[in-house]
Image: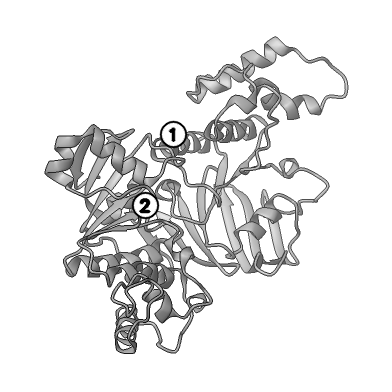
């Protein structure tokens, strides 16, 4: 395969956190490369280099096997690279057809614009990708997902050899992720390469040819995706199988704008008998995280810790057994110490670490769960618990959840990633917009 892009020992700094340190990357024709890293890992810096908004301070950039540099005053498309970000490259008050042909006709100094021909040409591209959109529709009337698909098609129409998809701010829903993945795979078969950037484990990772983990600006680890669906580490071994205990919920048509409480209520209301026989979970009021013996952990729980409070204070926030019987009441020292020591023992964290800001992301996530575990719930419902984690971190957190099930706590997971549920759950409830609930086991 012909090499499309290579970065060798790249170093670049654009601020206090967006940096590249001895970074390496290679991409070949028709290859889908998925790059994951948490905030501050260097994803933004890499995107800026590929978009021509910043240059490497050290190292070399090769495009098409030749030394190259993407100049800030020119478009990366001149080098065959097309960037798709949330700040869409599409113009809202222009039609789909006009957006698709904007760059093509922008190159012409002399000539005329044949509107009918453009509509027919763009309509052909859309039908080829299964998009039932009128080319005369203004882009501002389309959904964000439709705009993202159009941007990818536009890159293809413009002759890009590499399309960079920035997914660092979004979480793609099941059905839409499947559609986008199929589109990317079809286009890659034409020899166009893709780089997908993300801060969380997305559906695309399981369809990528290679996965790279970025950490503090370095290419820390890399996997190849093989036919059996197992990711083999080049630098270390990843567990091929994991114990599956949790129960999962998945809905292809669920929109991210609707809350987890709304989803659970809709499933229960539309599947009363199924819910009674198989779930039997007491519903929590909208916005409520704990009721009797049921706890709900939102996906951003790790970010809700209070950094200027010590770990022991964060760990005991949910404790009700206080002197004074209020949340502001006093907790006996012996109780607070026992709770904190148990947290350090379970996580293996050095007890000299006193504040959440000194913890890694997984340890923060565990702390955000642990403070509810000490209230002795029967059931814990998680919203996208592995959100923001790479594969190794996901497995570490999964082992903690197995520890909780070993204590008799029932774990229920709602996730917009079916691949994530297949990896960690032994039973998955699948619905369509909250209806037609059915349980599946051993999904392949």
Residue that mark 1 sits on: 179
Task: Work out which residue is located at the far front of the displayed protein and give it.
Answer: 324
Q: Secondary structure at mark 2?
A: loop
Residue 286: image location, x then y, percent: 37, 47
Taking the spot 72% from the left edge, 13% from the top edge, the residue there is 115
The answer to which quarter of the image holds residue 112 is top right
Taking the spot 67% from the left edge, 48% from the top edge, the residue there is 64
Q: Nearer the viewer, mark 1 or mark 2?
A: 1
Q: Which mark is residue 226?
A: 2
Taking the spot 69% from the left edge, 70% from the top edge, the residue there is 16
Direction from residue 42 to residue 278 in the image, left or right: left
Instruction: State how far apart marks 1 and 2 are (Cα).
Output: 21 Å
Q: Secondary structure at mark 1?
A: helix
Task: Work out which residue is located at the far left of the displayed protein and give it.
Answer: 277
Quadrant holding the C terminus: top left
Residue 144: image location, x then y, percent: 56, 35
317 or 90, which is in the foreground? 317
**Label 2 Cα neighbours within 10 Å, binned few <14 / some 14-19 / many ≥20:** some
Direction from residue 98 to residue 204 in the image, left or right: left
Residue 102: image location, x then y, percent: 74, 27
- The first of marks 1 and 2 along the sequence is 1
267 or 360, which is in the foreground? 267
Task: Work out which residue is located at the far right of the displayed protein and give it.
Answer: 110
């Amino acid at each position: 395969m012909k090499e499309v892009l290579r970065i060798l020992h790249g170093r670049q700094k654009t601020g206090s956190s967006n940096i590249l340190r001895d970074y390496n990357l290679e991409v070949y024709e028709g290859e889908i490369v998925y790059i994951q890293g948490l905030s501050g890992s260097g994803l933004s810096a890499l995107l800026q280099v590929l978009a021509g908004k910043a240059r490497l301070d050290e190292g070399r950039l090769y495009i098409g096997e030749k030394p190259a540099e993407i100049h800030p005053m020119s478009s990366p498309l001149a080098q065959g690279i097309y960037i798709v970000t949330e700040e869409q490259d599409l113009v809202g008050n222009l039609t789909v057809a006009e957006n698709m042909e904007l760059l093509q006709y922008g190159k012409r100094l002399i000539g005329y614009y044949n509107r009918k021909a453009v509509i027919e040409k763009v309509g052909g591209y859309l039908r080829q990708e299964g998009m039932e959109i009128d080319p005369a529709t203004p882009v501002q009337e389309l959904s964000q997902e439709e705009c993202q698909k159009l941007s990818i098609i536009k890159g293809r129409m413009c002759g890009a050899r590499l399309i960079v998809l920035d997914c660092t701010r979004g979480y793609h829903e099941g059905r839409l992720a499947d559609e986008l993945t199929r589109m990317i795979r079809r286009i890659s078969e034409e020899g166009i390469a893709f780089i997908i950037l993300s801060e969380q484990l997305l559906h695309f990772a399981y369809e990528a040819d290679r996965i790279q983990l970025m950490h503090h600006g370095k290419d820390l680890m890399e996997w190849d995706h093989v036919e059996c669906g197992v990711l083999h580490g080049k630098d270390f071994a990843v567990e091929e199988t994991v114990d599956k205990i949790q129960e999962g919920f998945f809905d292809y048509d669920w929109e991210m704008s609707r809350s987890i409480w709304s989803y659970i209520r809709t499933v229960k209301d539309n599947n009363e008998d199924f819910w009674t026989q198989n779930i039997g979970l007491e519903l929590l009021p909208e916005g409520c995280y704990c009721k009797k013996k049921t706890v709900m952990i939102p996906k951003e729980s790790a970010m809700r810790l209070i950094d200027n409070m010590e770990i022991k204070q964060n760990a005991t926030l949910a404790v009700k057994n206080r002197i004074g019987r209020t949340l502001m009441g006093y907790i006996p020292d012996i109780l607070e110490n026992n709770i904190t020591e148990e947290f350090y023992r379970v996580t293996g964290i050095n007890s000299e670490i006193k504040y959440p800001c000194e913890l890694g992301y997984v340890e923060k996530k565990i702390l955000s769960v642990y403070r509810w575990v000490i209230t002795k719930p029967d059931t814990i419902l998680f919203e996208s618990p592995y959100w923001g984690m790479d594969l190794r971190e996901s497995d570490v957190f999964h082992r903690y959840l197995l520890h909780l099930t070993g204590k008799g706590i029932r774990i229920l997971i709602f996730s917009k990633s079916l691949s994530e549920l297949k990896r960690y759950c032994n039973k998955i409830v699948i619905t369509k917009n909250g209806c037609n609930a059915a349980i599946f086991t051993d999904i392949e």
